[in-house]
């Protein structure tokens, strides 16, 4: 078994496409003509699928809870990625609940650096420098 894709429930496809394209630099790829609205992105050998589902499972909290469900992007240039996020407006000093909050763990229990942020629908996204 190998992981093929991560599916993320969103409410506004245009807003979410812009977020995943502009923040993470993902390339949008062709998506079959499903009866639902969505978008697919290439992410290395894997894919990220966005699906509009207004009554789907959404986090109510506007906080970054690293123990809650999330998915992770791995990068070979963690510090460069953090600089890019900061250039886009994400901030470590943003208050809890701010959509631009960035939580950093440069040295954490995982043994590699980790950063967490929220997408426009409050999905938790991790970026890490795992080996």
Image: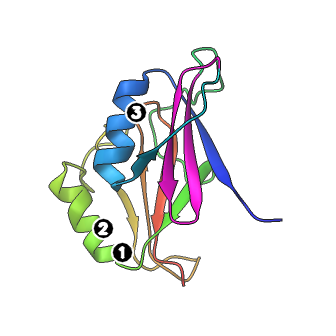
In this rendering, which labeled residue sits more in front, label 1 or label 3? 3
Image location (x, y in percent) of residue 87: 15, 56
Q: CA distance from mark 1 to mark 3?
A: 23 Å
Instruction: Determine the residue positioned at 42% across, 39% down.
Output: 119
Q: Check the image and report above or below for 9 versus 52.
A: below
Q: Which residue is mark 1?
A: 78
Disc 2 residue crowd, few under 14, some 14–19, many 20+, Cα 10 Å: some
CB atoms of marks 1 and 2 within 8 Å: yes
Image location (x, y in percent) of residue 106: 39, 76
CB atoms of marks 1 and 3 within 8 Å: no
Q: Could you say which quadrant of the image residue 32 lies in?
A: top right
Q: Which residue is mark 2?
A: 81
Question: Which image quarter is the C terminus in?
Answer: bottom right
Image location (x, y in percent) of residue 15: 34, 28
Q: Which residue is mark 3?
A: 16
Q: How many marks?
A: 3
Question: Which image quarter is the N terminus in?
Answer: bottom right
Magenta span includes 86: no
Is residue 74 in view?
A: yes
- Residue nearer the viewer, 18 or 28: 28
Q: Is residue 130 left or right of residue 105?
A: right
Disc 1 residue crowd, few under 14, some 14–19, many 20+, Cα 10 Å: some
Circle 3: element type: helix
Query: Looking at this rendering, what residue extends furthest in the left direction?
Result: 87
């Amino acid at each position: 078994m190998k992981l093929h894709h991560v599916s993320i429930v969103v409410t506004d496809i245009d807003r979410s496409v812009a977020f995943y394209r502009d923040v993470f630099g993902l390339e949008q790829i062709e998506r079959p003509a499903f009866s639902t609205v969505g978008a697919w992105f290439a992410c290395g050998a894997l894919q990220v699928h966005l699906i509009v589902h207004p009554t789907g499972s959404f986090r109510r909290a506007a906080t970054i809870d690293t123990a809650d469900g999330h998915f992770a992007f791995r990068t070979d240039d963690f510090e460069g990625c953090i600089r890019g996020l900061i250039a886009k407006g994400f901030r470590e000093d943003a208050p809890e609940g701010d959509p631009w909050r960035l939580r950093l763990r440069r040295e954490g229990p995982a043994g590699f650096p980790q950063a967490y942020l929220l997408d426009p629908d409050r999905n938790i996204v991790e970026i890490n420098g795992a080996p």
